[in-house]
Image (spheres, rainbow, N blue to C red):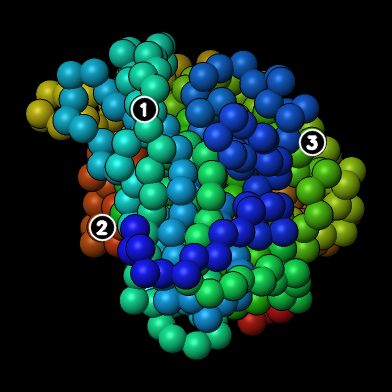
Amino acid sequence: MKTDTMWVTTPITPDLLRGFLDLEPTRHGVLPHRLPAAARRQIPDSQLAMAEAQPSGVRLVFRTRATTVELDTLPTKRAYRGMPAVPDGVYDLLADGELAAQATVDGGNVRTITDLRTGAAELTDGPTGTARFTDLPAGDKRIEIWMPHAEITELIGLRTDAPIEPITTDGQRVWLHHGSSISQGSNAAHPSGIWPALAARHAGGVELINLGFGGSALLDPFTARAMRDTPADLISVKVGINIVNTDTMRLRAFGPAVHGFLDTIRDGHPHTPLLVVSPILCPIQEDTPGPLMPDFSTGTMRFKATGDPADVAAGRLTLTVIRDVLARIVEQRAVDDPNLHYLDGRDLYGDNDFAEFPLPDALHPDPDGHRRIGENFVRHVFGAGRPFAG
């Protein structure tokens, strides 16, 4: 830290944060959550407990003339036993909507996953650290600091070389989105580069709340209730891939579960534009059921589907089946719900996109794939005459 700087210390309070549903006090500071406490008490596994505490889409927002910003945090980083280290999470600083600086934080806790199949893990405590942003543009500006999308981040302290003030309202529409690890940002290079963040920024006038949970878009009723109770102007639900790759449902249960999820959302948002999005193209699961398993045969971690396509006749689910069911459900419900819409996920990432930007692990898009999905979402959803047109 520079000793000649006159620092202004600002407590991290809810009016400085966007994209969270709950703020938990900790012995270090505060921990943003993307599910409320009532929902967290019903979480059945460590996968979702970890994912919802990873602050995908959560950001600090304020105005300032500062050219230097320091954010003290305690990250909880991931590691996989026997595999190369996971890169440190990236913090993005946007000035007036443009990426102006990036940082990482040394130290932190380490959660080492010892068994990919069961999710068993060991936690090692570590020290706090600081994300430093220097040489920022001069003059008054809107600052957004986006937290790492896949790294649990306790927020401890905020220092600047000029005073800050919260931005109480932007007059923006709130977009509440729920999806899987792709929505959370898997394989994206940095937090403002995940596809929902890109779509929100390029759509303009949209405030994102991202409930993308790695491995956990499973039509959980507590997630639906959280969405029901969250104020929003636009809502999207991208569902299907996790249900197939975890092999959690059969055809008989899937349709009623979708109806129940949508019914719950509609209890709190009876007329809000609501978009149901089916899975993007994923060749390994288009016509092969799950469960999905890690595959190290090439020397890097990829995924493979292990189900038997012959079981589809008995009710096993594939992405092809999922898309047919979702399209039919939306068509049926839209007779009485004109604000309900459907989008085939292959319009976001289909055959041509796969040919240009293959899935590096056979499941998740790379940074260019995220950019393409975000661009296509804006065109199909926020464009003139589309479901979320302003």
In terms of secondary structure, where does tag 2 sit? loop
Who's the residue at 73% across and 30% down the image?
A: 37
Who's the residue at 82% across and 60% down the image?
A: 272
Give coordinates of residue 364: x percent, y percent: 34, 44
Residue at label 3? 225
Name the kind of residue labelled 3 in the image: Arg
User: Cα distance, mark 3 to mark 2?
Assistant: 36 Å
Q: Which mark is residue 126?
A: 1
At label 2, counting other C-alpha atoms closer than 10 Å, the crowd grade (few under 14, some 14-19, many 20 or more) is some
Residue at label 2? 357
- Which residue is at the front of the view, 12 or 96? 12
Q: Quadrant of residue 337?
A: bottom right
Give coordinates of residue 240: x percent, y percent: 54, 37
Question: Relative to residue 277, is residue 309 drawn left or right?
Answer: left
Q: Quadrant of residue 219?
A: top right
Say which of marks 2 and 1 sits in front.
1
